[in-house]
Amino acid sequence: MNARRTKTQIYVDILRSLQRSNGRLRKTHIVYKANLTHTRLEEYLEFLLARKFIEEDGNGRQVFYKITEKGMRFLEQVTRLREISDAFGVSLY
């Protein structure tokens, strides 16, 4: 079995980290909660920002990331899809 996470799993981990933290975290906290390096996190944040699943919030000195309504809907749909696949015994990732 492959122990590496897929990109989708990492996106979900980042979004869930934000969701569980009242939707607002700094990069360092996302790194810890999603188990990533700062370098890898940048790539994933860029993707999520471009698709408006997350947004930056802050005063320039301290930047926070927060999950958007679109990001919350994405998590809901991923959860539903996972439940369906598990019910049929098919692994999504």
Image (cartoon, grey):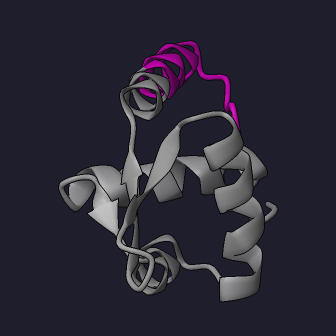
Residue 3 appearing in the image: no
Q: Position of residue 9 (x, y in %)?
A: 63, 50
Question: Horizontally, is 93 left or right of 26 in the view?
Answer: right
User: On the rendered image, what quadrant is the N terminus found in?
Assistant: bottom right
Report the front residue among 49 and 87.
49
Of residues 66 and 1, the one nearer the viewer is 66
Q: Is residue 89 above or below residue 38?
A: above
Quadrant containing the C terminus in the rendered view: top right
- Residue 90 appears at what percent x and percent y? 67, 23
Question: Residue 82 versus residue 75: which sits nearer the camera?
Answer: 75
Look at 50% across and 56% down and name the residue there.
13
Residue located 49% across and 78% down the image = 27
- Where residue 52 appears, as percent x and y from the top left, is 57, 35
What secondary structure do most residues of the magenta stretch adopt? helix
| 78 is within the stretch colored magenta | yes
Residue stretch rendered in magenta on the structure: 77-93
